[in-house]
Image (spheres, rainbow, N blue to C red):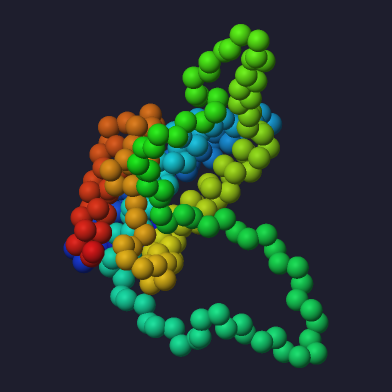
Amino acid sequence: MSQTPPLPDDDVPHGALIEEGGRLVRWLITEMRALFAGLAGQPPGLAWLRQYIIPAEAVLRRAVHLIADTLPPLEPSTRPRGSVRPRAGGGPAPQARKPRAPVFRLTEPLSRPPTNYLPVNQRHRISVAGDAPPPPAPPPRKPDPARLQARLLRRLAALEAAWDDPVAAAERLLRLRARTPRPAPALAFHKIPGLKAEPLRTDGQRILQDLNTAARTAALNSS
């Protein structure tokens, strides 16, 4: 949003709310960058994911969904599905591809209905005299600090890229909607990710809840 003009409040539905969400995301990104700078070689904790990245993603995701609803419909593609653009004959073989840039996720996993399945380590155990005792439950796996840091940095980079150009993210959402049969890609409207994160406090929670209500109403009206 730093590289695009502010959305006019009078012309764009929920323009002021979207701008509020953008400022909140910018603040959360700044806080995360400051935390990373102060690590001094120490690995980050999972609390950063829960307290900063997840709520920032939830705010921006709902803002992007609202922006997508203001954009004109996509023009149908004339390129056949599955077609591959031929490479000029005689040319050099293509070089190895660079690592793919992290992509901001536009959807959220919905909560699954409860089931009766219990993992083996959570089931009741019955001991029988003379039988060998059941094996102990495996210890929980500790997260690898290097992998965790790489994961957090990739999600932060994707978040920053989408924040810098939310219209491009909204256009990608339109393409995703065009490829996906109804219902359209959903958000977890009933269980908002990161809503109870401490850094949001009252104002941040209000912005996230208002964005969630607006995005949910828009989704219901379009279905």
- Say if 218 sits above or below 58 in the image: below
Q: Is residue 122 visible?
A: yes
Residue 89 horizontal/vertical position (percent)? 76, 91
Residue 122 horizontal/vertical position (percent)? 50, 24
Taking the spot 43% from the left edge, 62% from the top edge, the residue there is: 169
Taking the spot 66% from the left edge, 33% from the top edge, the residue there is: 145
- Say if 168 sits above or below 82 in the image: above
Residue closest to the eye, 34 or 87 = 87
Q: Is residue 16 visible?
A: no
- In the rendered image, the quadrant that contains the C terminus is bottom left
Residue 148 horizontal/vertical position (percent)? 62, 38
Residue closest to the eye, 52 or 117 = 117
- In the rendered image, the quadrant that contains the N terminus is bottom left
Left or right side of 44 for 69: left
Residue 181 horizontal/vertical position (percent)? 36, 68
Taking the spot 21% from the left edge, 58% from the top edge, the residue there is: 220
- Say if 86 sits above or below 118 in the image: below
Taking the spot 80% from the left edge, 90% from the top edge, the residue there is: 90
